[in-house]
Amino acid sequence: MFSYIRSKLPDRYTLVRLAQDSDLNAFAKDARAGLAANPKYLYPKYFYDDLGSKLFEAICLLPEYYLTRAEREILSNHADAIVESIEGPARLIELGSGSADKTRYLIEALLKKQGELRYLPIDISDASLEASSAELLKVYPQLRITAYASDYFTALNATGEASLVEKIGNRTIALFLGSNIGNFNPEEAQAFFRAVRLVLWPGDALLVGADLKKSPDIILPAYDDPLGVTATFNLNLLARINRELGGDFDIKKFAHRAIYNEELGRVEIYIVSLAAQRVRIRDIDLEASFEEGEMIHTENSYKFDLDQLAELARESGFFLKRSWRDGAERFSFNLFTALENN
Ligand code: AVJ
């Protein structure tokens, strides 16, 4: 079902590549369904091919994209307190580790507290996993890494099964940084919390970074920056269809659009067709036609308040033990504790 790949760092690094529906197939299937639908949509998980992952790292450097800096501020100020709020030696599972840059604050706090640590990053980009793990292993000799190249749900189950020995005598801390939770609609967020709860034991912790509701004057520029990095990130979805599925999108005839839907408390991201046009996608044998102004919905990014987070916890077998915020109160970092009964 899955393969272990040994790297140059044999005893401190293992990569587990979990067999899924071949990625190419899943992308082809989902792209076909989304572009044949009305209204059209594409899933945000497909942003993150190797180029898309790099473009997202560039977004995180933008002054308008306050989320990364706010979360970094919280972690750099409170990592020790966060770790101290969780009793006992722990292993750290990260869902969507990306560059694992901000994770270092928690890794360092845990190493300080317990001397050694097993870190289990999960990411769909194995290029990101390889690069970030090599970096971390160089810097932290007391770190061991088991990396999962996989979607969250498949890998979560594997971390639960593969490591019973390690779970005994260790707490598990599950980490979900960067307001990635914002991509889920409320039902999906609940299902996700429940899936995480299933691999945790009572007293284990789930740490979640969540962007807060606030004025659209602050939120919108983070999703529509003047340099056009976010636009490029969004349009890369079409470029990816051209590269991987033999599409002939003329990228210049499409544009990025972000709106804040205040009622639903979410940013909605679209790709707008700037002309009436037809696009042929050879490998999925699809011809998609667009009207001028027609949109492809590519992402939602939900914003939260603490009541919503506490309720999400209650619905899924956790309780919200503590929250931290950055000085400007834009972003929250939340400690959920797994309760006895599911
Ligand atoms: C990675 C989902 C947290 O919603 O802020 C950034 C993705 N999209 N700019 C977010 C994203 C456009 C990001 N998340």
Image (tube, rainbow, N blue to C red):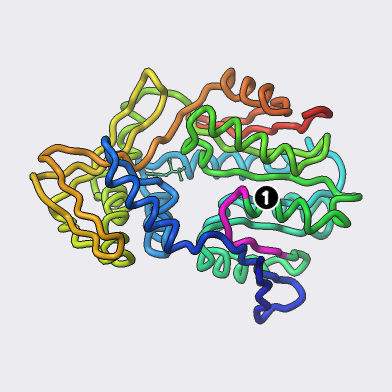
* Residue 148 counted in the magenta span: yes
For the point 42% across and 39% down, the residue is 66
Q: Is residue 197 left or right of residue 272?
A: right
In depth, the one of 61 and 285 nearer the eye is 285
**At numbered mark 1, what does the secondary structure look like: helix, strand or loop?**
helix
In depth, the one of 186 and 303 nearer the eye is 186
For the point 59% across and 18% down, the residue is 307
- How far from the left and from the top, in percent, is residue 256? 23, 44
Q: Which residue is mark 1?
A: 156
In depth, the one of 37 and 130 nearer the eye is 37
- The correct choice, above or below, for 175 with respect to 266 in the image is below
Q: Residue furthest bottom?
A: 8
Residue range highlighted in magenta: 145-153
Q: Is residue 33 left or right of residue 330?
A: left
Q: Residues within 10 Å of mark 1 (few under 14, many from 20)?
A: many
* Residue 211 counted in the magenta span: no
- How far from the left and from the top, in percent, is residue 116? 81, 60
Asked if residue 326 shows in the view, the reply is no
Q: Is residue 321 left or right of residue 230?
A: right
